[in-house]
Amino acid sequence: MSQSTLVYDIRNSRYLNITGRCTLRCQFCPKHNGSKQVHEYQLDLDHQPTAQELIPLLGDVSQFDEYVFCGYGEPTLNLATLIAVASEIKRLGGQVRVNTDGLGNLFHRRNILPELAPVVDALSISLNADNETAYVQHCQPKLKDSYAAVRAFIRQAPNYINKVQVSAIEGLEGVNIERCRDFVESANAEFKHRHLGIVG
Ligand code: SF4
C-alpha cells in the first residue's frame, strides 16, 4: 500500500488531507466508487494526522494562493488539527479555505464557527440538494437531521467568515439547482454550480 498523502498541490493551492472520516456517504463521492484518488494523489489515510505532522509539510506559504482543507473526509471532524494548522498558516501570512459538508456544528453539538472565524478566510460548503428527500438519497447522512443542520450552518456562516461559497451538483436526480441557488443567495453566500464527476 502506498503511503498516505497528507498534502498535495492542485494548480497554485496546497491541499491538506486531515481526515478520512465523514458522517455522509455521498453516492457521488469517489471514495465510494472504488477510487481514493484525486488527480494523481492517493488520499487513503490510515490515521488521523496531527498538527505536528502537518505543519512541517506546509512549505513556503508565499508560494501558494491558498491552503485548502479537503481530501476524502470531513475536515471539521479533526477540528483540533484543523484549527492548529490553520492558525499556523495565518501566522505565516497564508490564506485558508475549508471545504466542508456543513455538519460540523451538528457533529460537535456546538457552534464551531466562532472557533473557525479567526483562522479561516473562506468556506466552501456542500449543500447538494434543495430538499431533504434528495439529500438523504444522495448523501446518506449517518446523523439525524443533517439536512436541517447544513442549511442552518449555511445561514450562520456568512456572519463569521468573509467568503462563503456553497455548492450543489448539476445532474443529481431530484435536485433543483435553481432552488439551491435561491437559498444560498438568500443566506448572503455565493452559489457554486458544480458538475457531476469533477472533484477538486
Ligand atoms: S461529504 Fe465529501 S468526503 Fe463525505 S461522503 Fe460526501 S463527498 Fe465524500
Image (cartoon, rainbow, N blue to C red):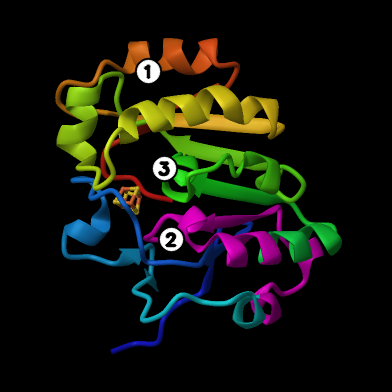
Residue 101: image tag: 3
* Residue type, mark 3 in image: Asp
SS for dot 3? loop
Q: Nearer the viewer, residue 109 or 104?
A: 109
Sequence-earlier tag: 3 or 1 = 3
Q: Is 157 on the left or on the right of 49, as rendered? A: right
Per the model, the C-alpha gap separating discs 2 and 3 is 12 Å
Up the image or down, 23 lies above or below 130; here it is: below
* Residue type, mark 2 in image: Gly
Q: Position of residue 100 (x, y in %)?
A: 47, 45
How many other residues sit within 10 Å of disc 3, few (<14), some (14-19) or many (≥20)? many
Residue under label 1: 180
Asked if one can make out residue 177 in the rendered structure from this viewpoint, the answer is yes
Up the image or down, 59 lies above or below 155; here it is: below
Q: Residue at x 50, y 47 (%)?
A: 99
Q: Is mark 2 within 8 Å of ligand 1?
A: yes
Q: Which residues are magenta?
A: 55-84
Q: Quadrant of the N terminus?
A: bottom left
Q: Nearer the viewer, residue 93 or 87?
A: 87
Sequence-earlier tag: 2 or 3 = 2
- Answer with the quarter of the image where residue 194 lies: top left
Q: Residue at x 18, y 46 (%)?
A: 27
Q: Is 34 on the left or on the right of 110, as rendered? A: left
Q: Is 119 on the left or on the right of 104, as rendered? A: right
Q: Is mark 3 within 8 Å of ligand 1?
A: yes
Residue under label 2: 71
Per the model, the C-alpha gap separating discs 3 and 1 is 15 Å
User: Is 70 within the magenta?
Assistant: yes
